[in-house]
Image (cartoon, helix red, strand yellow):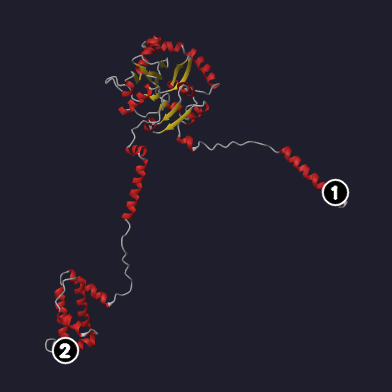
Amino acid sequence: MNKRSLAIIAVALLILGAGIAWIASNIERYTRHVDDGATVDVILNPWYAAQALLDQQQKESHRSFNLHPVLEKLKPYDALVLFNSSTIGNPATRQKLMDWMHGGGHLIVTAQEEWDFDSESADPFLDSFGIRFYYQEEEYDDDYEEEYPEDAAFDEMPESVNESAALESTDTESVTEQTEESEAGQSCAFIDYDDLFEVTWNQDILLIESLGGYTLDDEYDEAIRTGESWPNALLQYQVGAGKLTVLMDPTIWHNDRIGDYDHAFLLWQLVKQDDIIWFVSSNESENLLGILWRTAPYLLIGLGFTILIWGWRRWVRFGPLIPEPSNEHRQWLEHIEAATRFDWNHHQGQTMVDQLRQDIQQIMSRHHNLSYSQNQAEWLELLTQRCKLNQQQIQESMTQPSPHREHPWMELISQLQIIRNAL
């Protein structure tokens, strides 16, 4: 290798090294996070976040869209979070839940039916515990008048006094508005306190969302826990060895709300002593097909296959198929057969036989001057030469009585027509 080649290699290596150094000094590393949205499991499971929270706390949890299959799997000291869209109207279901709670189960249920003060009834299941769920707007107004009598008296003053008082407070209000605007400019979080409820739990004050304007009332004073505030958003009762917890809005534990306020903390406080937590989205009565599928799935599968096989056999043809008629012209005998079949179906068999025999005799008499009764031998010999039938067949065709069966009658008609056409 000469010096020139070495110089070229050295220059190439220098250029390559300089390029690598430049790329290394100018390259920029970054991480890109792509949000593909919620997975199918999250979309189909409104309790996914709640189950993830319990899984972090090493708590086993399950979900279902129907209460009845879960009732068979519940064990003592489990917790059932029931998002009931209506009252538990089935007496058998109510009794099963009561027996399970007496054995140590914990039922978390929603108050759905508003208390009717006229009939003094609402939800049969919750009525037995003395739970009253109602709208208390009127009580709000009464409490407001009792706590702020000055404001109520101010509302009852004459308009002239109110106007003078309003003029005197104009300057003060302007200063207050400026202060409030400056404070609002520094904050961007606004809370609708109409739906926020305080719940005191082990000396901790929790904030949870619920139905604004509504409250839960313990009529019999038998609740072991309440929200300890008014309006009240939670009641808990001791039922044998188990518990019953009543809320107004269990959707606070859905995926899009469990992270708000103290919703997740309240869920953990309620179920941390339970073994397995079940989230159920409906308590509607199970339909007949659902019951059969749950109790006898193999029977339904067998019945379905039986129906399929019966339907398949029902529409399958039995025996040979009749070939489709060809487009070729019919032969002369086929026309004869079709015409004779038509006469036979219309009960004209004897008439047609007599007519054909008469035609044959007239043709023989007119063209050959032969009579069947007088010149029978010559008559038969001539027909034998013309129609290629033997004398016995011709004689039987002209003398035998008309058959009473279709096939022999059609053969007789066919022979008579062959004789007539041959003449």
* Residue denoted by label 2: 377
State the CA–CA distance, disc 1 to disc 2.
135 Å
Horizontal side of residue 27 vs 205, given as left or right: right
Give the foreground label among 1 and 2: 2
| Camera-side residue of 212 and 144 | 212
Q: Secondary structure at mark 1?
A: helix
Amino acid under label 2? Ala
Quick check: 324 above or below 64? below
Q: In this rendering, would 230 be left or right of 54?
A: left
Which residue occupies the foreground of this view, 395 or 89? 395
Residue flagged by tag 1: what amino acid is it? Answer: Ala
Question: Disc number at residue 249?
Answer: none
Depicted 3 relative to depicted 286: above or below: below
Q: Position of residue 80 (x, y in %)?
A: 41, 26
Whichever of callouts 1 and 2 sits on the residue coming sooner in the sequence is 1
Residue under label 1: 7
Q: Residues within 10 Å of mark 1 (few under 14, many from 20)?
A: few
Split into 4 quadrants, where in the image is the C terminus? bottom left
- Horizontal arrangement in the rendering, residue 28 relative to residue 115 (left or right): right
Quadrant in the rendering for residue 348: bottom left
Residue 326: percent from the left, percent from the top?
33, 71
How many neighbours does mark 2 have within 10 angstroms: few (below 14), some (14-19), or many (20 or more)?
few
